Image: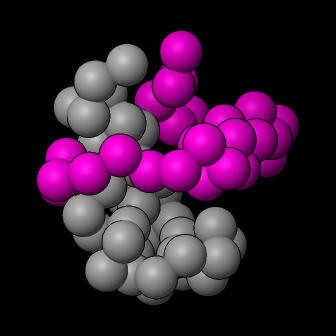
Amino acid sequence: MDREHYSRAISSAVEFFEGYGTLAVILNVSVDDLRRWAEGKSYPPAEVLRRLATLARRPDAAPVRRLA
C-alpha cells in the first residue's frame, strides 16, 4: 500500500475524532508521528494500522476510510 492510502485513512480518523490529540491518545502515539503519517511523510507501524482498522470496524464509529 502507498503512503497516500494510509494518509487518507488517518486523516479521516483525525477528522472523526476531532483532532490529532484525541486520536493520538487513542492510538497511543505522539501527535508529531500522527501528523507525519497523515501528511504522507512516513508509514505508520503495523500495530497502529491494526488499531485504526479496529476503530473503523466498531459499530458505533462513523465511516473511516478502509485500509484495504
Residue at image position (38%, 58%) is: 15
In-image side of 30 versus 42 (left or right): right
Q: Is residue 47 magenta?
A: yes
Residue at image position (17%, 53%) is: 41
In-image side of 50 versus 33 (left or right): right
Location of residue 29 with respect to 37 vertically, above or below: below
Location of residue 30 with respect to 39 vertically, above or below: below
Residue at image position (52%, 24%) is: 66
Q: Extreme right residue here?
A: 59
Location of residue 18 with respect to 51 vertically, above or below: below
In the image, residue 64 lies at what x, y percent?
A: 52, 37
The main secondary structure of the magenta stretch is: loop
Location of residue 57 with respect to 35 vertically, above or below: above
Rendering colour mode = one colour
In the image, residue 53 lies at what x, y percent?
A: 66, 37
Q: Is residue 47 visible?
A: yes
In the image, residue 25 lies at what x, y percent?
A: 61, 81
Q: Is residue 57 magenta?
A: yes
In the image, residue 7 lies at what x, y percent?
A: 29, 42
In-image side of 67 versus 48 (left or right): left
Residue at image position (36%, 71%) is: 33
| Segment tinted magenta in the rendering | 39-68
Viewer-proximal residue, 19 or 60? 19
The quarter of the image holding the N terminus is: top left
Q: Is residue 52 visible?
A: no
Viewer-proximal residue, 20 or 31? 31
